[in-house]
Image (cartoon, rainbow, N blue to C red):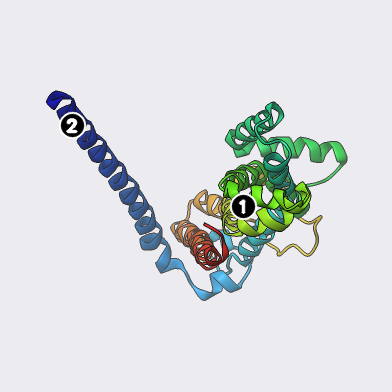
Amino acid sequence: MEKKWHRRNISELIIKILMAISFAIVICSLGMIVWTVLSKGLPALTLDMITKTPKGGYYLGKEGGILNAILGSLLLASGGTILALLFSLPTALFLETYSKNTIWGSQVRLALDVLWGIPSIVYGAFGFIIMLAIGLRASLLGGILTLALLELPIMTRAMDEVIRQTPRDLTRAALALGVTKAELAFQIIVRQTIPGMVTAVLLAFGRGIGDAASVLFTAGYTDRIPNSLLRPAASLPLAVFFQLSVPFPEVQQRAYASALILTFLVLFISIISRLIVWRMNKFTIK
């Protein structure tokens, strides 16, 4: 008995050490990334970079900014997230309400997990092939459609996991009172899981705004702000890539400033999502 107790203590100690090491690695990695972006990007970050579009010779170190990429990223990610939400929410509700504990539901979840793991460059290539088939050029619309496909499995599976945490007593009580499954899904489950739903949406949005490979072929790149869905649109990840590819130190430093703006946007989204979840948790049944 004493030996068994001793083994348990040793196992627990090893697990705690591994957890501490993992935590230290995560924190150090995050700190190094943030420090690199801040130290190299902050000196090049000016008001012109945020409020102006690239002028002639911008990639040679002359004046201009990346307003086109900032607005382009927001338009692409917002459009893709809204479009993905229109399909993700009904799918997640259907899986839990109508296909709960069925083979069909398990197969759909497996398919979504596989789609989640597919590299974003594959989504970009697939979207590019579809665009060629229907005669659509690289445009804001093409980027939105591709990002919607990319975000769909992420948002759906996140929502599905949130919905599965709904208290069973709540759903059973609702069904006992005679509500239909549709009423249960949209009037009870959605209200109960709004904080988690918001987190799922913002998680997908953060993935969309930071992705470069999927919009490289589909959204294109332009120095102008898109005034139509059929016009090309720039994005911050591609702006970082193109600026780092230029052999001029001034432009490369601007790439780190662009990366700093992108990091700030993702951080801002994360903070807002936490605040929304904290506020809405007060109105859910535990």
Residue underneath mark 1:
170
Residue 110 image position (x, y, % from top left): 63, 30
- Looking at the image, residue 19 lies above or below residue 220: above
- Residue 8, percent across and down? 21, 30
**Label 2 SS:** helix
Q: Which mark is residue 145?
A: none
CA neighbours of label 1 inside 10 A, class few (<14), some (14 to 19), many (20+): some
Mark in front: 1 vs 2:
1
Q: Quadrant of the N terminus?
A: top left
Please name whichever residue, 117 or 2, is drawn nearer the observer in this view of the structure.
2
Q: CA distance from mark 1 to mark 2?
A: 42 Å
- Residue located 61% across and 57% down the image: 192
Quadrant in which residue 41 is drawn:
bottom left
The picture quadrant where one finds residue 283 is bottom right
Secondary structure, mark 1, is helix
Give coordinates of residue 24: x percent, y percent. 28, 47
From this view, report whether residue 224 is shown above or below residue 182: below
| Badge 2 amino acid | Ile
Amino acid carrying label 1: it is Leu
Looking at the image, tell me whether mark 1 or mark 2 is earlier in sequence order: 2
- How many circles with numbers are drawn on the protein? 2
Q: Which mark is residue 10?
A: 2
> Is there CB contact under 8 Å for labels 1 and 2?
no
Residue at image coords 65%, 49%: 171
